[in-house]
Amino acid sequence: MFPIWIALFFGAIFAAYTTAHVPKEMQHIERVKANVQAANFVSYRKAVIQYLAANPGVSGDIPDTAIDIFKEPGFVKNSAWKSYAQGAQLFVYSNAPVAKTLAHEIFSRSSNNPLVGIKSATGNLVSFKGADTGISLPSVIPGNAIVVAGK
C-alpha cells in the first residue's frame, strides 16, 4: 500500500508542476519565435530597401532573386514575406496571417513606426494603434496582412 501512496504523491507533484509551469514555457517559446521571425522580416525589408536604392526605377513585385546580393550573410527568407514597389512607395508584407505576438514584435522593431499595420477591408493601411492612415494599399496585398509602408 505504501508504494501506491508514494506514486500518487509524486504523480500529484508532477501534475501540479506541469499545470503551473508548461503554460509559462509555451508563452516564452511563442515570444522567442516571434522575436526571431520579426528579425527575419526586418532583415528582409532592409535588403529590399538596399535593392531599391540601387534600382530606383523598379515597380511591382520584387522577386527574391533580385535581392540576393543585398541579403545579410546566412539570411534565409521566410517564404511569407513579400515586397511591392509602387512609384516611390515600398510595401513589405506577409502573404499569410501572422500571430499577434509577431505583429507586435515587428511594430516594436520598427521603432513603433505608424506606417506598420494591417490591410483593412477597405484596402487602407490601419496602423498598429488602430488609426486609418489613409494609405491605399495595392491589391496584391491580401486583406488582414501585416504591412510596413515606406522606406
Image (spheres, rainbow, N blue to C red):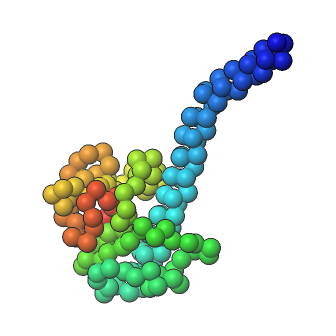
Residue extending furthest top?
1
- Give coordinates of residue 54: x percent, y percent: 42, 85
Residue 12 horizontal side relative to residue 60, left or right: right
- Give coordinates of residue 130: x percent, y percent: 26, 45
Q: Looking at the image, can residue 148 be seen?
A: no
Along the viewing direction, whichever of 58 and 19 lies nearer the viewer? 19
Image quarter of the N terminus: top right
Residue extending furthest left?
122
Along the viewing direction, whichever of 82 and 11 lies nearer the viewer? 11
The residue at 22%/70% (across/down) is: 138
Along the viewing direction, whichever of 13 and 74 lies nearer the viewer? 13
Image quarter of the C terminus: bottom left
Task: Name the quadrant containing residue 118.
Answer: bottom left
The residue at 69%/20% (across/down) is: 12
Numbered circles on residues, count: 0
- Give coordinates of residue 75: x percent, y percent: 57, 72
Q: Is residue 132 above or below residue 49?
A: above
- Give coordinates of residue 115: x percent, y percent: 31, 58
Residue 111 horizontal side relative to residue 11, left or right: left
The residue at 36%/73% (across/down) is: 83
Task: Name the quadrant containing residue 92.
Answer: bottom left
The residue at 78%/21% (across/down) is: 7
Residue 44 horizontal side relative to residue 29, left or right: left
Task: Name the quadrant containing residue 61.
Answer: bottom left
